[in-house]
Amino acid sequence: MAKLNRREWLASFAAAAAAGAVLPRGAGAQQGGPSAKEGKLALEEYVPKSMLHVRATKVARARFPAVDFHTHLSWTPADGRKANQNTTPAKALEVMDRRNVRVMVNLTGGFGPALEENVRYWRQSHPDRFVVFTEPWFGRFAEPNYPTFQAEQIEHARRVGAKGIKVLKRLGLGLREQVTKGPLVKVDDKRFDPMWEAAGGARFPVAIHTSDPEAFFLPTDKYNERYEELSAHPDWSFHGRDFPSNRELHEARNRVVARHPRTHFVYLHVGNAEDLTWVSGWLDRYRNTSVEIGARIGELGRQPRAARRFFDRYQDRILFGTDAVPDGFETPQQIFGDELYEIYYRFLETEDEYFDYAPSPKPPQGRWQIYGLGLPDRILRKVYWENAARLLGLKG
């Protein structure tokens, strides 16, 4: 048989496929077409290496001192009795000093006695380097006086030294009428109105995580771009049960923001980084809002032109954050360490192309790469320091 050229081979292959023929394994290679080994490579074993020859810039330190607005240095059990530390101030400071992180915000400072313990632990020796936020005491939600109790907890948190409140996505996706049973409690449930108002009165920014990536609300099938992530963590999927949709969650949160104009809300994870046009509408409509970029450079960096326009337009309302968790947290892109900061700095400061968005052998969120924004100094200063410093009352 004469050897076919590529065009002829493709035409014959298409004709055979249309006729329902099954080519013998390796037939493509024999005719000058694609080759295949015996058997199939499992998707989880596939770790392709890019053949692009592009610039790779190492950015060891932020160009300007930074506030990491989104870290998790501690965690608190539901009873609020004792704080649990993910690392120590000394270990955190080693990384901070190497990477030019001037201040780190521990969003998960807890509630009750644990909050007081966390404030002492992180701020006693280094009050200018660590900021601690409180959290809602969801474990007491079923108590009849909860709205008043939670508002009073905000004032207590202010007195003991907290500087803000972090509201987890559990509000809307996990908290139920009997805490763990019954219908889900909506994000805009008016029983939380006293808490939002108390936060405004205490000048506490509200760092709020609402919903999750849109793919988490879709079937985990061959069309889902986060198939591998959701297959590894099936409990992260909100599809097919009694959960509200992604859009319903964000709309409920926006109703809260509209009802409480004197309270400042920081949308963690950019709010909904897959749809910057939608997020822009929120920022234009609600002046009491900012966004934070933690764990979303994988989304921002694959739409670099739209993201650059977003940073230009909202440069006074974007905060730097990483969603870092010290010492081996289960999600690779969130592991606290040097590589994570280098990737964020490279994304913000350079125009490098097609690089990893996480320090992981495989992309943890989806199989894509990102592009740097190359932000000018005037915007970098705001994103790294000025915007967060204004909200938190930081000096220097």
Image: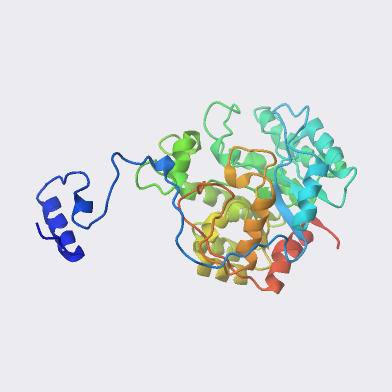
Q: Is residue 232 above or below residue 379?
A: above
Circle count: 0
Instruction: State whether residue 155 appears in this view.
Output: no
Q: Position of residue 339 (x, y in %)?
A: 65, 52
Asked whether 375 or 237 is in front, the reply is: 375
Left or right of 48: which side holds 180? Answer: right
Q: Looking at this view, is 324 or 393 the one in front? A: 324
Residue at the image position 75 percent from the left and 52 percent from the top = 200
Question: Residue at (54%, 61%) from the top-left corner?
Answer: 301
Q: Is there any visible trace of residue 363 in the rendered image?
A: yes
Residue 238 coordinates in the image, percent (x, y): 47, 39
Q: How is the image coloured?
A: rainbow
Q: Is the residue 229 above or below the residue 372 in the image?
A: above
Residue 292, quarter of the rendered image: bottom right
Quarter holding the C terminus is bottom right
At 40% from the left and 36% from the top, the residue drawn is 240
In the image, residue 353 lies at what x, y percent? 52, 66
Q: Position of residue 311 (x, y in %)?
A: 61, 68
